[in-house]
Image (cartoon, helix red, strand yellow):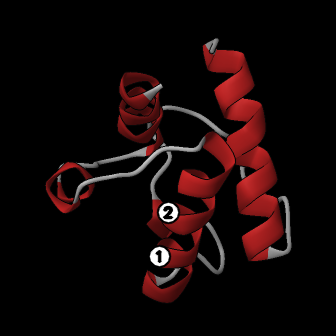
């Protein structure tokens, strides 16, 4: 799957969970920069990503995430 397709699906997930589009998918984007992306919504977002991409994350992989770029790379590695 191409990166642009992953970014599109990520936008769909974030919009669905956060109920707004006040963000831009970019590699250096962090949860702290996005309104409503708190720890609870973070877990919902991760679950939605796993479902949408039909993948499973390991806790150690999630603990290494620093920003949207590292999340997209992790998704690519699982596909």
State left or right for residue 9 relative to residue 38: right
Left or right for 55, reference 6: left
Query: Residue most toward the left?
Result: 60
Quarter of the image where one finds residue 71: top left
Q: Is residue 21 left or right of residue 48?
A: right
Q: Which residue is mark 1?
A: 43
Dot 2 alpha-carbon crowd within 10 angstroms: few under 14, some 14 to 19, many 20 or more: some
Figure quadrant of the N terminus: top right
**Can residue 31 be spotted in the picture?**
yes
**Where does residue 7 sit, x and y in percent of width and height?**
68, 32
Query: How many discs appear?
Result: 2
Find disc 2 in the rendering and name its residue.
Answer: 46
At horizontal 28% and vertical 49% (from top left) the residue drawn is: 65
CA distance separating discs 2 and 1: 5 Å
- Element type at marker 2? helix
Q: Residue at x 62, y 56 (%)?
A: 51
Decide which of 73, 33 is in the foreground and name it.
73
Asked which secondary structure carries label 1, the reply is: helix
- Check the image and report above or below for 62 versus 9: below
| Residue lying at 47% horizontally and 42% vertically, measured from the top left | 68
Asked if one can make out residue 24 in the rendered structure from this viewpoint, the answer is no
Q: Is residue 77 above or below residue 44?
A: above
- Residue projecting furthest to the bottom: 40
């Amino acid at each position: 799957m191409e990166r642009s397709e992953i970014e599109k699906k990520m936008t769909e997930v974030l919009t669905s969970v956060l109920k707004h589009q006040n963000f831009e998918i970019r590699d250096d984007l962090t949860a702290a920069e996005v309104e409503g992306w708190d720890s609870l919504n973070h877990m919902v977002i991760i679950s939605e990503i796993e479902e949408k991409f039909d993948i499973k994350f390991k806790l150690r992989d999630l603990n290494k995430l620093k920003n949207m770029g590292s999340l997209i790379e992790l998704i690519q590695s699982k596909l």
